[in-house]
Image (cartoon, rainbow, N blue to C red):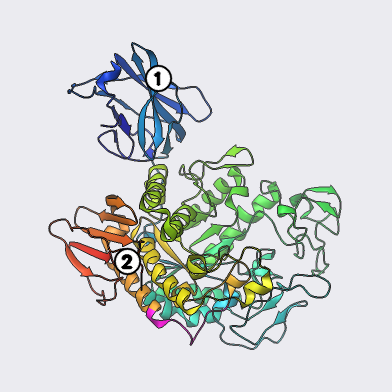
Amino acid sequence: MLAFDSWDEQYKRPFGAITQDCPIHFWIRPSKAFLVSSARLRMIPDGKSPLVVDMQRLDVDEENDLFYCAYALSKPGLYWYDFELDTPNGRQYVSLVEGGRGDITEHATKSWQLTVYHSAFQTPDWLKGGLIYQIMPDRFAREGRTLQEIPEGRFLREDWGGIPEHRGDKEGNNLSNTYFGGNLRGITSKLSYLKSLGITAIYLNPIFEAHTNHRYNTADYLKIDPLLGTEKDFKDLCSKAGGLGIRVILDGVFSHTGDDSRYFNRQGRYRDEDGAYQSKASPYYSWYDFKKWPDDYRCWWGYETLPEVNETNESYLAFITGPDGVLEHWIKAGASGFRLDVADELPSEFIRKLRETVKNLNKEAIIIGEVWEDASCKISYGERKSYLNGVELDSVMNYPFRNAIVAFLKGSGAQALYTVVMTILEHYPRPCIDVLMNLLGTHDTLRILTELKGDKGDGHDRAWKAEHHLTRSQREEAICLLRLAAVLQFCLPGVPSIYYGDEAGLEGYEDPFNRGCYCWGKEDTALIDFYQKLGSIRNTCPALRSGDFRALAVHGDLIVFERYTQDQQLVCAVNAGKNNEFFDLPDGFIKIAGDCIRENSLTGIYPKNFAIFTIISNQI
């Protein structure tokens, strides 16, 4: 028997992160061979000295001693814990070895992490059990008016579906100023399609005026980019989407602006007032850090086109979070929340003020942060972040799940996937887990089909990547693997997020090729049908909305897990290997699908106990 296992409620209860003042029960079972006379819990506030708690000796069996204590923490934050033992050989420890498992060590080595969050922390119910669809607005759909006036310096392409521009012009400039003309009306025109997928939230990449097609260099926070439409178009999208039960989440880019913006105005485009580059008397001058005005300034990752702002500057903070500020403007216009770009580069003070403002305007609005690592213990610029304590973010983009699923389908094994899933579930507060943004692809990653089976592209330039596509056999294998990935994405705790076109079979290497136009009229309809079936399950299965997670089998390339509530259980089995695997369903379960969910339509209300099977091997 293990000395301790934080993933097993025989050793720690409750599992995972806890609210402040919640009693935690600990049991350790050191082998009798160590002759342990007494034991203590060491609870270590992050960066501080341990708090030591005596443990009570309980019943003794023939193999192991048993020690117990209960402890509660009143202050939210990050803690670490392990156990110290008194033995005839001196003091020894129970330290973390692997996963949640611990063993006796001579010295205190690795401790377990414990996240303690505010008891009032709640996340929006409307997103739980839902489904997000991410859209790059220029590349999804276009509809309506012909543009009469295109802002200076932009080029509108007519070849919808063409290869995104990847070459510099003769002067070496990046042609991110070429557009395909996708717009807000186009998105509105496709709402019925999104509804057929089961979508409950649209996450839009930036829509504010900005002079690149990706729009992460904001030029005017209070204006819709003219190529996308008008504020009326945005309100119309939110209204019509809302009528279908779909909310709209905006991308908030608050760590920097564009140099070609009304706030910095390096290009002199905005003539109604001076920007910080033009005058120290500008109302925006204090937003930026100039080492030597005007040409030497702090900029995002060294890109001079992206001057960084001082997020805690009184004027800037009021502009974003104050009365009639940016957040209030767009929440009142219909937005249901924000995804925060580069959240790990935003000061905690700014995020907390942003949360306060957003929740005061609409307590059901969602705040999702872009964090690529474990967000519960992230260190950024030397500072331990507290994103998930209940006073900053609701949720994050769940890159750890994404990376683990991709690795699993490429041969890392089921145990590696299980370890990542359990680590995140252990570290994150339950309110956050229920709305985790579970993604397979985004505008910052390779398209998932290319990721699963494409040549890595190492050593190749953009010209090669622009022309290179999966072979027919590679594509068939990639689609089979994508089905497995999607089943995991839809059935693991959290909320699946589909990157536009992944469900239709789009391919592509990194930016700009992962940002191609949606392939209207050329979709992989069988793949779309598969996603629609998964969406149907999401929308009618309480176990996927609020159910707990429990592994039933983890070995080789096979993972089988259960999502369950008091009233319903769902079993999901995925085999990433080349050989068929077998697993006996628990008693009382009904198999409603098999062979990668090709057998049934999967519509309607699902029974109390049912199983989704992808037990077939990943071979075609």
The answer to whether one can see residue 24 in this image is no
Res 24 → quadrant: top left
Q: Could you tell me residue 218's position as x and y percent?
A: 68, 64
Badge 1 is on which residue?
52
Instruction: Kindly identify which numbered label has been placed on residue 303.
Output: none
Helix, strand or loop at mark 1: strand
First in sequence: mark 1 vs mark 2? 1
Say what amino acid the circle numbered 1 marks: Val
Q: Main secondary structure of the magenta part?
A: loop
Q: Is residue 263 above or below residue 551?
A: below
Res 192 → quadrant: bottom left
Res 148 → quadrant: bottom right
Q: Nearer the viewer, residue 541 or 159?
A: 159
Q: Which residues fall within the magenta stretch?
A: 517-526
> Quadrant where the N terminus lies?
top left
Mark 1 residue crowding within 10 angstroms, few (<14) / some (14–19) / many (20+): some
Q: Is residue 494 above or below residue 462?
A: above
Is residue 115 left or right of 384 when viewed as pictured?
left
Residue occupying image coordinates x 72% and y 74%:
177
Q: Nearer the viewer, mark 1 or mark 2?
A: 2
